[in-house]
Image (tube, grey):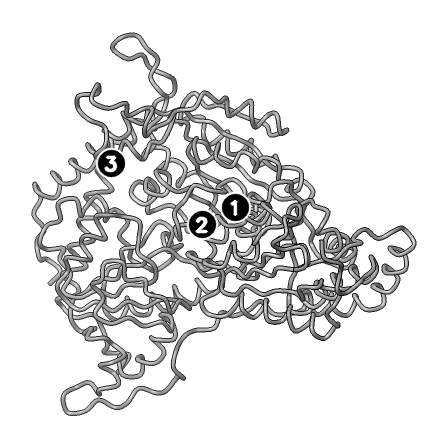
Amino acid sequence: MPASAFPTSTAANLRAALSLLLALRRQGLRRLVLCPGSRSAPLAVAAGMLERHGLQLLTGVDERSAAFLALGLGRVDGMPAAVVTTSGTAVANLLPAAVEADSGSVPLLLLTADRPVRLKGCGANQTVNQEQFLAASCRACLHGDGRGLAAMDQQAIGVLADRAWAAALETPVGPVHLNLPFEEPLHAGAAELVELAAELAMVAGAGAARAEEAPKPVRERAREPLAKAEAPGPGGQSQAQADLLGDLDPDRAGVVVAGPWRGTAAELERFAAALLRWQRRTGWPVLADGLSGLRGWPGLELVAAYDLLLAEPPGQLAPPQLLRLGPMPASRRLQQWIAAASGPQLLISEAEPRNLDATGSATVRRGEGLAAWLERIWPWLAGDEASAAPAPGAKALAGHWRRAEGLAQAALDRDLNLHLDHTENTAGAGGESKPPAAEPALARALSRLLPAGLPLMLASSSPVRDWESFADPAAPQRRVHGFRGASGIDGTLSIAAGLALAEGELVLLTGDLALLHDANGWLWRRQLDTAGCRLTVVLVDNGGGGIFEQLPIRPQAEQAMDFERLFAMPQTVDHGALAAAHGVPVRALASLAELGAALSWAAEHPMALIELRTDRRADALLRQRLRATVARQLASRPMTRELR
């Protein structure tokens, strides 16, 4: 192998690693997730030293799980957490989280140790082209000096750290890969550690204080400078106002569709206040996705049962115009309804300049965010505030949606309460034991039982869809997290652990395959305990991939295809035993009547599992019956125009 072009020392490597992490701390880095390795030893020791000066250090043995934990940490407050790994395939394990962070706009720093460039392309052990692994999903891929990080002076290292931090927080926020070669020797001795710790104590205090005092970043908005709205011309609107409104007429009927929320809680408050202002002025109903964070928001008039109502939508619900906010909701029926709408559609995204118009039906797209947009048009829109009010046609359309929502929720209360009232297993026609609960009924019960403000995460596939359609809209408002960027089941438990560490407490609703897919996430229990945080996992165990029962896959003639083996893939894993092996207490429910007590029990533990067994095939049929019931209700009670 070629000789080193820049001989170094263990002390020089450690000083370089400390310089990098101190520079990131000055920018605002507060949390770092460390995975084991030898090549990454300088970064590991530097992180351990900085833990004494305020850095929150978390350690995990699985790089894939660690990256998802950091993803959950960064989602809550919009500040990137860092992940440190060694070289080789460890870096490849970061890709699933990088894909979700990219698609879902979550800031994330991926710091990977590497061999120096002299060892590339010559068969050296654990030396791969890792600098290219994450390129397709990262906002930036930055590199230390190919001779080794210690070959860079302190100023150059600081510039590298500043570039990485800035790239993670530029609009749209996302993951950044910082690949850092280290030349041997890597492992400092005791004398060097003592000496460097003393040096660090002299410089780290001020940097740590700045990191803790640094304000949380307000995401840049891709918008033009604010300006007052022009006075309307003879035709009513100025050209600038028409451009801002995107052909929407606030004095005619319309509908708002609010997609999943990807910002911070503070940003959501500003967004919701602007939406409430718009609704009071226009009277437009708001179809709010289950991940929007808007359900239960005081003052907002929302529609939650749209997925059921749009199975066979009556003509009175057709939208003359649409204001669409953020990413596309999960509901396929809502997506089809949006695509079929013939009127103007204005799509406004929040700090997201990329195209979010999956239906291709938006007539105008804007990226400055709802609050900024409304601020620009409000002087013209409000006019005389005392007289500005929704138009009669808008009131009529809102009345139709209000009545349809009421009919749907009454039907759900009636049909799902039958499942909520069951207190024990019942026997089927053949004497076999039937599952104690239905998944739609679980979503409704959980929404009612969770205390106001307790954050919730919904796993992809069935849980997020059941919450969207069957959660009680009268339940209190809470932050609802979901990761619909790439909509995978990767890292479900680890993301939830990261959210719990950042929020303080969290409930995760997940299916069995998603939970099993990230079984190493149970290893975060000890760190949750140390941090005084709580994560309750509510497991829907339906013996495989329940989402496939809701798709037109299973043939009527079952011998034509082995549906269970090819799609559902049930696993013979005892989830309770697996959790218990990691020191996590478990409670299996006999019925939904026990859910409230189980949630109270789980809140006493840093990590707890609540198991509920369901029948995915029966629940798929139940969802179909519920939709048919709502459609019959709408058809049998034609909506009048009493609010016109």
Circles 2 and 1: CB atoms closer than 8 Å: yes
Residue at 20% x, 22% y: name it.
560
Name the residue tied to disc 1: 495
Residue type for callout 1? Ile
Sequence-wise first label, 2 or 1: 2
Determine which quarter of the picture holds residue 617.
top left
Q: Secondary structure at mark 2?
A: strand
Q: Marks 2 and 1, Cα distance to the nearest angstrom?
A: 10 Å
Residue type for callout 3? Leu
Q: Nearer the viewer, residue 72 or 97?
A: 97
Give the class, few, some or many, for how many residues have Cα within 10 Å of label 2's Cα (few <14, many ≥20): many
From what the image shows, is residue 241 above or below residue 72? below
Residue at 59% x, 27% y: name it.
585
Sequence-wise first label, 3 or 2: 2
Residue 466 horizontal side relative to residue 599, left or right: left
Name the residue tied to disc 3: 551
Residue at 39% x, 50% y: name it.
486
Q: Nearer the viewer, residue 312 or 358?
A: 358
Residue type for callout 2? His
In the rendered image, residue 83, in percent from the top left (x then y), is placed at 62, 53
Q: Is residue 212 visible?
A: no
Sequence-wise first label, 1 or 3: 1
Give the quadrant of the C terminus: bottom left
Give the numbered dot on residue 122.
Answer: none
Give the numbered dot on residue 481.
Answer: 2
Q: Secondary structure at mark 1?
A: helix
Residue 316 horizontal side relative to residue 465, left or right: left
Q: Marks 1 and 3, Cα distance to the nearest angstrom?
A: 27 Å
